Amino acid sequence: MAIELKNLTKKQLAELAQRVASRSRELDVEELDKVRADVRAYARSKGYSIEQLFGGRGRKGKRGKVAPKFRNPADPAQTWSGRGKRPRWFNAALRKGKKEQDLLI
């Protein structure tokens, strides 16, 4: 199936490029699924499970939810767990002279 690119409009080319990228991603997923199935089958044939081989630890770096630690006194609906970048309201409260302990829940 040959496509004559010279006869396509810019819009048609963009659509084609999008379809090509989408199909390429689908093929990648299909190939990964096949490789995973092959690895599981090989491990099973040797008497092992994937969890035994790799520890069943799940994904590294993924953290669970944490309860909020700080609350915005001006808007109690705004909270912060203390993880990650400080929210603007937290920095603004510190600039106004509040202390971290004042913002604790």
Image (cartoon, rainbow, N blue to C red):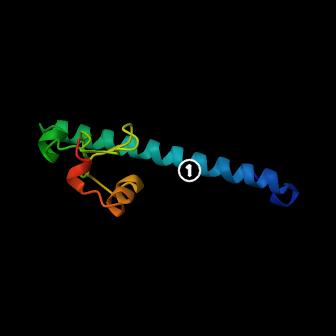
Residue 34 appears left or right of 54: right
* Residue 58 in the image, given as x and y percentages of width and height: 22, 43
Q: Which residue is mark 1?
A: 24
Occupied quadrant, residue 56: top left
* Residue 42 in the image, given as x and y percentages of width and height: 22, 41
Q: Residue 36 or 60: which is nearer the viewer?
A: 60
Residue 23 visible in the picture = yes
Residue 3 visible in the picture = no
Q: Residue 64 or 52: which is nearer the viewer?
A: 64
In what element is the residue under mark 1?
Answer: helix
Occupied quadrant, residue 53: top left
Identified at 59% across, 46% down, the residue is 23
Q: Residue 25 or 76: which is nearer the viewer?
A: 76
* Residue 69 in the image, given as x and y percentages of width and height: 24, 44
Seen in the picture, residue 87 relative to 74 is either above or below; the reply is below
Residue 26 appears left or right of 49: right
Identified at 23% across, 55% down, the residue is 100
Report crowding for label 1: few under 14, some 14 to 19, many 20 or more residues within 10 A (C-alpha).
Answer: few
Identified at 22% across, 46% down, the residue is 104
- In the image, farthest residue toward the front: 97
Residue type indicated by callout 1: Ser
Residue 56 appears left or right of 22: left
Residue 20 appears left or right of 74: right
